[in-house]
């Protein structure tokens, strides 16, 4: 049986889908999975060994260039590739109108959430199979339940396994007891002040950790350079492809991150991960993992470096006492 997964974005949403894939692999060995995803996240999807062909979409870019001939050639090429694959089933794990419109390009029956369960009820007009999954569950559990209903098995919700391992990578000078500080995120109100990152890095260095920082734009570069300049021994990784960052992340001993996709990836790798939420609620989409924790700023308050280090100590103790 050939099944196409449609979960195009964001990085966190893609990562939240991996446990559902792992469930399916364990319960349905007869299924071959492909995936349709936004092009920046194709390397993340490739981390799961059960995924075969990865079809890339560029919905955001296409919307801006609808009159461009190249856009129509790309969309036509995607439709042709999906039809040629002859899928038995498409699972729209996103539940949005845009994901449903991508899913119908495959020309196969589509399974997804029912009208009461989907994020955008209009998407369900394109589904042949619709399943009720409570909306008050974490996104990971919702997706696991959807896959189980669509593929005919009962997932074991008492266990959580993403099924992914860090990619291999060239990591010169980055080894030992490293702590990756993921300071960058998409919104200003989700960012910890640079002074707090510097103090956190100092406390980590005092505990014999090597802080690691990187950046993806000029604003993040200034923060990364400030941390590295203030705390001797900090490793500053230049702007790098996502696969290289994932390789460094996956070999870290500890990760402290803002509300960003890479923080979700760290928790999916099973790393001790402290996620810092300042302006958003982790609620039903926060990082989940065996050694993941979320610090939520209280109303009118903040998350301090001392708060972070207290949680670091708790997670490291938990990790050291866990069965091998």
Image (cartoon, rainbow, N blue to C red):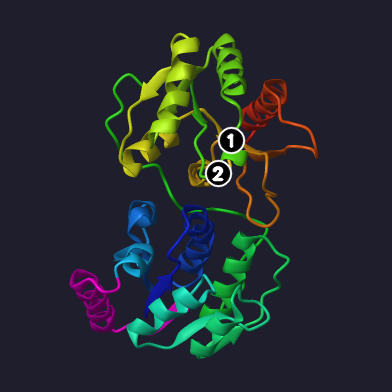
Asked if residue 117 can be seen in this view, the reply is yes
What residue sits right under mark 1 in the picture? 191
Q: Nearer the viewer, residue 171 or 38?
A: 38
In the rendered image, the vertical position of residue 207 relative to residue 65, given as above or below? above
At 67% from the left and 39% from the top, the residue drawn is 278
Where residue 21 sits: x, y (%)? 48, 64
Where residue 190 sits: x, y (%)? 61, 40
Say if the magenta span includes residue 305.
no
Q: Nearer the viewer, residue 181 or 133?
A: 181
Say few, some or many: other residues with alpha carbon within 10 Å of mark 2 (under 14 / 14 to 19 / 20 or more).
few
74 displayed left or right of 29: left
Tell me whether the residue at label 1 lies in contact with that at label 2, contact meaning CB atoms closer than 8 angstroms.
Answer: yes
- The range drawn in magenta is 66-91
Say few, some or many: other residues with alpha carbon within 10 Å of mark 1 (under 14 / 14 to 19 / 20 or more).
many
Secondary structure under badge 1? loop
What residue sits right under mark 2 in the picture? 187
Say if the magenta span includes residue 89.
yes
Q: Quadrant of residue 324?
A: top right
Where residue 57 sits: x, y (%)? 33, 66
Secondary structure under badge 2? loop
In the rendered image, the vertical position of residue 56 relative to residue 195, given as above or below? below
């Amino acid at each position: 049986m050939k099944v196409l997964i449609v979960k195009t974005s964001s990085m966190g949403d893609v990562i939240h889908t991996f446990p559902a894939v792992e469930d399916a692999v364990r319960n349905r060995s007869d299924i071959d999975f492909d995936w349709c995803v936004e092009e920046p996240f194709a390397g993340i999807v490739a981390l799961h060994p059960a995924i075969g062909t990865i079809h890339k979409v560029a919905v955001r870019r296409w919307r801006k260039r609808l009159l461009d001939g190249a856009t129509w050639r790309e969309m036509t090429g995607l439709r042709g590739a999906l039809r040629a694959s002859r899928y038995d089933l498409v699972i729209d794990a996103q539940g949005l109108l845009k994901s449903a419109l991508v899913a119908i390009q495959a020309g196969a029956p589509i399974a997804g959430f029912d009208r009461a369960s989907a994020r955008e009820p209009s998407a369900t007009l394109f589904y042949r199979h619709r399943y009720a999954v409570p909306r008050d569950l974490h996104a990971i559990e919702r997706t696991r339940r959807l896959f189980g209903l669509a593929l005919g098995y009962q997932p074991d919700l008492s266990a959580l396994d993403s099924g992914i391992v860090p990619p291999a990578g060239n990591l010169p000078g980055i080894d030992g007891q490293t702590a990756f500080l993921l300071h960058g995120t998409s919104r200003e109100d989700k960012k910890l002040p640079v002074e707090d990152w510097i103090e956190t890095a100092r406390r980590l260095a005092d505990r014999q950790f090597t802080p690691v920082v990187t950046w993806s734009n000029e604003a993040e570069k200034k923060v990364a350079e400030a941390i590295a300049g203030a705390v001797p021994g900090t490793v500053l990784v230049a702007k790098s492809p996502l696969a290289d960052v994932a390789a460094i992340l996956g070999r870290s001993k500890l990760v402290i991150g803002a509300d960003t996709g890479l923080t979700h990836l760290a928790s999916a790798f099973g790393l001790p991960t402290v996620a810092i939420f300042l302006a958003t609620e982790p609620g039903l989409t926060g990082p989940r993992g065996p050694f993941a924790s979320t610090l939520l700023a209280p109303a009118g308050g903040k998350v301090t470096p001392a708060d972070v280090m207290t949680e670091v100590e708790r997670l490291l103790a938990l990790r050291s006492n866990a069965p091998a």
